[in-house]
Amino acid sequence: MEKLRATITQYKRWEALTLYIDRMEGHLESDFSLAVENAKALLESIGKEICSAKDVELNTAPSINAVLKKAFNALGYNSEALVNRISGSLASIGQELGNLRNDISPTSHGKSLDELKARNGKVDLLTREFLIDSTLVVAVFLIRAFEERKDATAISDDDSELPEELNYLELEPFNTQWDDLYGEFEMGEYSYTASEILFRVDYQAYENEYRIFQETEPELDTEEEE
């Protein structure tokens, strides 16, 4: 959960979410129903905050699936974008968390004594970690996408210019720093660095982050000299 904590540290707006993270960590093994409940609440809170900030209206009692889909749309992805095409799948993670919470929570519908004893055994530790890790990936993406698009408006007013199109292979110092922060992502037999994913999936966000890197790099050099 360190990547999510680091993201929240970077963007103080989301600091209150640490409550959910602490609860998820504390109950992952001892009472998974509470970890699931807080994972679901984490995604709902992020989605609702994005919708609120973007003036996107939600129904009185929207499902977590609906909240996450509207949050993706609020971030500006059109129907042609790759991220929007997979948003339904990611939102389904949230929906399944809700279904699982109802199935194993001791208070959702009331349980018999035998059901109470057996409820944590319904989900093995590997599956628990997968579900929580999936939640964290979605949470980090939503927060960063929101913050980077918000900052992009301010950056666009800057008169400084970048080349018309950045060459990924020529930006090794920035790519290395980004990869050191966020690592690699494995999908079966495939593995991709964080910088490559950002460059290929959201070029504008990559360009914005590179601009910020350029502005801070001289300051880092000065500190090292001192």
Image (cartoon, grey):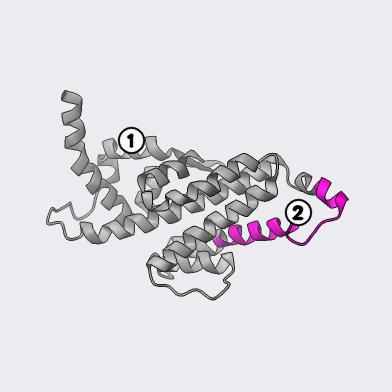
* Label pair 2/1, CB-CB below 8 angstroms: no
Q: Where is 140 relative to 68, above or below?
A: above
Q: Where is 36 relative to 220, above or below?
A: below
Q: Position of residue 86 (x, y in %)?
A: 51, 61
Q: Where is 38 relative to 74, above or below?
A: above
Q: Where is 6 relative to 138, above or below?
A: above
Q: Position of residue 225 (x, y in %)?
A: 16, 24
Q: Gap between marks 2 and 1, in whole Å?
A: 46 Å
What residue is shown with label 2?
106
* Residue 96 painted magenta: yes
Which mark, residue 176?
1
Residue depicted at x 47% and y 58%: 46
171 relative to 77 in the view: left or right: left
* Main secondary structure of the magenta stretch: helix
Q: Furthest-left residue in view?
A: 159
Label 1: few (<14), some (14–19) or many (≥20) C-alpha neighbours in 10 Å: some
- The residue closer to the viewer here, 39 or 166, is 39
Q: Position of residue 136 (x, y in %)?
A: 52, 48
Which amino acid lies under the numbered mark 2 shown in the image of this protein?
A: Pro
| Precedes in sequence: disc 2 or disc 1 | 2
Q: Quadrant of the C terminus?
A: top left
Mark 1 element type: helix
Label 2: few (<14), some (14–19) or many (≥20) C-alpha neighbours in 10 Å: many
Residue depicted at x 39% and y 43%: 9
Residue extent of the magenta highlight = 91-118
* Residue 20 painted magenta: no
Residue depicted at x 19% and y 43%: 215
Mark 2 element type: loop
Is any part of residue 128 visible from this angle? yes
Quarter of the image where one finds residue 95? bottom right
Which amino acid lies under the numbered mark 1 shown in the image of this protein?
A: Thr
Residue depicted at x 64% and y 51%: 36
